[in-house]
C-alpha cells in the first residue's frame, strides 16, 4: 500500500477525474482509503467539498468509530458506510459516485432490489471475472438518511451477495471498492461504463 501521504494525493486526483467525467458534480461523492488496519484508520473526504478542486488537504483521518484523528472540518456524512466496506469487504479503498446513469439504473431495478449485468466484455475488468459470460449481480438498497440503519441493511445485503463488486443506493449512486486503490478505480470505471450501457439500452428499447 502507498504511504498515507500518497494516498490522499491519489484520492484527490481520482476525485477530480470523477468530476471531469460528470460522476461527482456539485459536492456529491466521497472517496476513502485505509491507512492502517490495526488499529483501523481511514482517510476520507471532508463533507461539502467541490470535487473539481479536491486537494490532499481536504481529507481527514478517522478511527473505526468515525472519530476524526487528523485534519480539519467534518468527514463525509457517509463515513459509516466506508468503514463498513473496509471491514466486511476488506476494502483498501472505497469510492462513491453520483452519476446520471447509476441513478437512473438504481430506479429501473428498484423493484427487483438489484440488476443483473451479463454478456459484456467489460465485465472482465472486475476482479476475478474471466469471461463475458459472467453474471454480475449489483444490489440496490433503499436510501436512508440514518447511516447506522443504512449500514446494517447494506451489511445484510452484501452477505447475501458475496460476489458483488459494488452496490447502488436507490436514487443516489454507486458504491464500489477494491483491495487496492488502483483496483477500486478500475471497478469504478468498469461499473460506470456498464451502467451507462444498460441505461442507454433501456431508453432505446423503451423510449
Image (cartoon, helix red, strand yellow):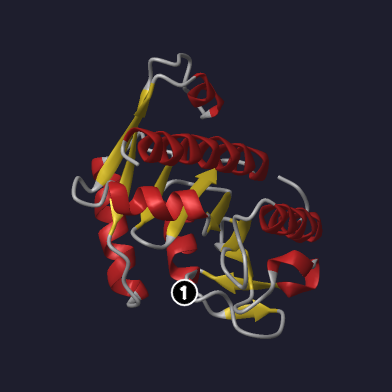
**In the displayed structure, would residue 82 be above or below residue 3?**
below
Count numbered badges in the picture. Answer: 1
Q: Residues within 10 Å of mark 1 (few under 14, many from 20)?
A: few
How far across and how far down the image is residue 8, in percent?
75, 61
Farthest front residue in view: 207
> Does dot 1 land on a helix, a strand or a loop?
loop
Farthest bottom residue in view: 73
| Observer-nearest of 201 and 122 | 201
**In the displayed structure, would residue 163 be above or below residue 32?**
above
Q: Quadrant of the N terminus?
A: top right
Residue plotted at (55% across, 35% down) = 190
| Observer-nearest of 4 and 162 | 162
Which quadrant of the view contains residue 150?
A: bottom left
Residue topped by disc 1: 65
Residue plotted at (59% across, 73% down) = 62
Q: Is residue 174 left or right of residue 179?
A: left
| Observer-nearest of 27 and 33 | 27
Residue plotted at (73% across, 52% down) = 17
Amino acid at each position: 500500500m502507498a504511504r498515507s501521504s500518497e494516498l490522499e494525493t491519489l484520492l484527490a486526483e481520482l476525485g477530480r477525474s470523477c468530476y471531469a467525467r460528470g460522476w461527482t458534480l456539485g459536492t456529491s461523492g466521497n472517496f476513502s482509503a485505509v491507512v492502517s488496519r490495526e488499529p483501523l484508520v481511514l482517510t476520507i473526504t471532508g463533507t461539502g467539498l467541490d470535487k473539481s478542486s479536491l486537494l490532499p488537504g481536504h481529507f481527514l483521518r478517522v478511527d473505526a468509530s468515525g472519530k476524526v484523528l487528523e485534519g480539519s472540518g467534518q468527514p463525509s456524512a457517509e463515513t459509516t458506510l466506508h468503514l463498513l466496506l473496509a471491514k466486511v469487504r476488506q476494502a483498501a479503498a472505497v469510492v462513491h459516485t453520483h452519476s446520471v446513469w447509476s441513478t437512473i439504473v438504481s430506479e429501473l431495478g428498484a423493484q427487483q432490489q438489484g440488476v443483473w449485468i451479463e454478456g459484456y466484455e467489460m465485465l472482465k475488468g472486475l476482479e476475478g471475472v474471466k469471461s463475458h459470460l459472467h453474471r454480475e449481480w449489483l444490489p440496490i438498497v433503499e436510501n436512508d438518511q440514518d447511516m447506522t440503519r443504512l449500514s446494517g441493511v447494506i451489511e445484510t445485503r452484501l452477505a447475501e451477495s458475496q460476489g458483488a463488486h459494488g452496490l447502488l443506493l436507490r436514487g443516489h449512486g454507486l458504491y464500489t471498492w477494491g483491495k487496492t486503490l488502483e483496483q477500486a478505480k478500475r471497478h469504478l470505471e468498469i461499473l460506470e461504463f456498464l451502467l451507462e450501457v444498460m441505461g442507454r439500452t433501456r431508453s432505446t428499447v423503451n423510449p
